Image: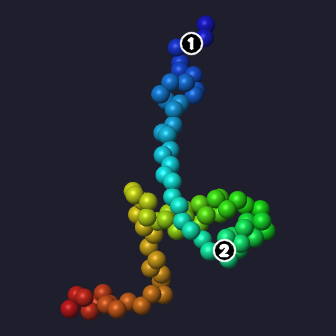
Amino acid sequence: MADHTAPKYGSGAAGKRKRIKYRQMGFKLTDGQKKALEHYCKVHKVTPIRFIKSLVNNHVARYRPGDPPPSYVTENQLDLFEEEEMRD
C-alpha cells in the first residue's frame, strides 16, 4: 500500500512564502520630464511604474543588507603602494 503520511506540496508551513511588505513613495516631475517618461514608455512598451522600479532596483541592488557591495577594483588600477615598499 502507498504511504499517505507524506506532506503534500504547497500545504502547511513548508508551502508558505514570506509576505512582501510594500511602502508608498511619491515624487514630483516637471511637465517635460513627465512627457519624456510617457514617450519612452510608449516606445519601449513598458509602464511608467515598471520602468521606475527597474531603475531603482538597478541602483540600490548593491546596498541591500546582507550582500557585500561589489568590488570595482580592476587589474589596470594604479597601485599607489607597492607590496615591496610596504615591507621595508
Mark on residue 82?
none
Which residue sits furthest front? 31
The residue lying at 54 percent from left, 65 percent from top is 27
Horizontal relation, residue 18 to residue 28: left or right: left
Q: Secondary structure at mark 1?
A: loop
Density class for disc 1 (Cα within 10 Å; few <14, some 14-19, many ≥20) is few
The residue lying at 44 percent from left, 60 percent from top is 64
Mark on residue 31?
2
Quadrant assignment for the N terminus: top right
Quadrant assignment for the C terminus: bottom left
Out of 81 and 17, give the one closest to the viewer: 17
48 over 2 or under it: above or below: below
Out of 34 and 18, give the one closest to the viewer: 34
Which residue sits furthest top? 1
**What colour scheme has been applied to the protein in the rendered image?**
rainbow
Out of 29 and 73, give the one closest to the viewer: 29
Q: Earlier in the sequence, mark 2 or mark 1?
A: 1
Answer whether residue 79 is visible to the viewer in this image: yes
The residue lying at 56 percent from left, 12 percent from top is 4
Amino acid type for the residue under numbered disc 1: His
Horizontal relation, residue 63 to residue 42: left or right: left
51 over 19 or under it: above or below: below
Where residue 73 sits, quadrant-wise, is bottom left
Amino acid type for the residue under numbered disc 2: Asp
Q: Which residue is mark 1?
A: 4
Q: Secondary structure at mark 2?
A: helix
Out of 7 and 38, give the one closest to the viewer: 38
Horizontal relation, residue 7 to residue 50: left or right: left
The x and y percentages for residue 8 are: 57, 22
Where residue 35 sits, quadrant-wise, is bottom right
Q: CA distance from mark 2 to mark 1?
A: 64 Å
The x and y percentages for residue 80 are: 34, 92
